[in-house]
Structures are given as structure tokens and as C-alpha cells.
Image (cartoon, rainbow, N blue to C red):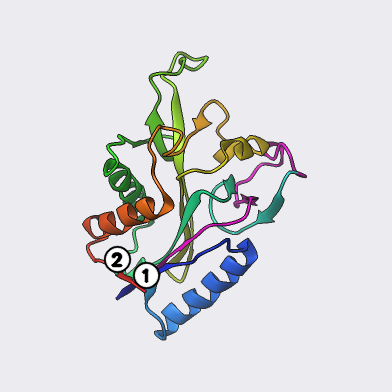
Amino acid sequence: MIEWITSSGLTGFREAEAWMEARVAAILDGSAPECIWLVEHPPLYTAGTSAKPNDLREPERFDVFPTKRGGQYTYHGPGQRVAYVLLDVGARGRDVRQFVQQLEAWVIASLAQFNITADIREGRVGVWVTRPEKPPTITGQPAEDKIAAIGIRLRKWVSFHGISLNVEPDLSHFEGIVPCGISEFGVTSLVDLGLPVTMEDADTALLQSFAGIFGEAPHPQ
């Protein structure tokens, strides 16, 4: 069984890390099932294992939390749905690349429920949408914005951390970092794309899309 847990209010980042550490240990010893945990955080920046100091543009703007997940700098804050994914990747084939691709496909399928065409890009982490109404980049490429970030960590093949989907965050808060080390493209959200989507709408889309990607429907708590 996969539990689906939704927390109300804002969850502190270190509190979330401690909860995940405990839950991973419980999954490993068989005392708790796998789970998807949905949270919102207060405004903050996190630094993954590949974070570059120069990519933290405004270190005094919000609290900065070093983490051991993969990736570079990310922003979390109100209006962004963070889905922590605590699954036994060992029991699912021990293929980390495939697991990350499943996370990407889960986000893309969820966005499709709002008629948003999203995709991944070689060499650019996360999930992206094309913005034809914007001028092309300085290299002549079509404008694209990131709508979701992905960063995971494994312990004895159990995953934690996960995805962050921009529903209606304050997009100016991303200006304090170079998100995921990518400076030539911007960030967007469901509401920025003109969709009156609530957090509850996004949660429903994520829940409904999950089984089609991972082959098992989670059980809401």
C-alpha cells in the first residue's frame, strides 16, 4: 500500500527532512508503508549536492538549507506543491534513471489534465512549457519556462525528496537564485499560464495521474 498524505499549513524544511528520515527508516524495517507526502513550505532556498555558490544571488533574502538531495539551488514557498516521494525503488527494478523519468512523466500527465503540454529537455532538469507569446532567447531558441523541479535522494533504494510543482507561488522569489543552475530560461506556474487552478485542483490531478505512471493507486489518508 502507498499512503497519500496531505499536510495543511506551512511545514518547516528541517521538520520535513526529519519526518522523511524517520519514514524512510520505517519503510526499510517494514513498520510503515511507502508514501507520497504533499506539503507547502514557507519561503526558502535549498542547495542540492551540485549547488554552485555563485548561483545563490541573494543569500540574505530567505533561509538557505543545504541538503543531500541531487541537484542545485531550488526555491520552495507558499503556492508551490511539494510532493515528497518515499518509494522503494529497489522493489521497482533498481533503475534510478527510469524512476526519475517516471517522476517527470507523472508531472507531465498531471499537467495534461489542465490541457497544458509540458515536456522534458535534454540537459535541463525539470519539466518545461513553451511560451510562444514571449520573445525567443538570445540564442534564438523558443522561450520556455520551468513549471516543476525534480530532485531525489536514495537510501538503501528507498527514495525521498521528490518534485515541486508551481501552482501559484510568488515567482519573484525565484530571482534570489539561479534555479537548478539554468539562467537562460525562466519559471512559470499554473496560474501564471492563465489557469485559475487551486492547490486542491493540483492535488487531485497528481492523485489521479499517479497510478497510470507507477501502476498502483495510492490511498489517501
Badge 1 crowding class, 10 Å Cα cut-off, few under 14, some 14 to 19, many 20 or more, is many
Residue positioned most to the front: 196
Image point 39% across, 84% down: which residue? 30
Judging by the rendered image, the residue that carries numbered circle 2 is 92
- The answer to if 19 sits in the magenta stretch is no
Q: Is mark 1 in CB contact (under 8 Å) with mark 2?
A: yes
Q: Nearer the viewer, residue 142 or 53?
A: 142
Badge 2 crowding class, 10 Å Cα cut-off, few under 14, some 14 to 19, many 20 or more, is few
User: Residue flagged by tag 1: what amino acid is it?
Assistant: Asp
Q: Nearer the viewer, residue 202 or 136?
A: 202
Image point 40% across, 24% down: which residue? 131
Q: Nearer the viewer, residue 95 or 16?
A: 16
The CA span between labels 1 and 2 is: 7 Å
Q: Taking 219 as reference, is 84 left or right?
A: right
In the displayed structure, would residue 128 be above or below residue 148? above
In the displayed structure, would residue 33 be above or below residue 115? below
Judging by the rendered image, the residue that carries numbered circle 1 is 88
The percent coordinates of residue 58 (x first, y second) are 73, 39
Image point 46% across, 31% down: which residue? 145
Quadrant of the image occupied by residue 159: bottom left
Instruction: State which region is magenta.
Output: 35-60
In the displayed structure, would residue 64 be above or below residue 188? below
Q: Quadrant of the N terminus?
A: bottom left
Secondary structure beneath label 2: helix
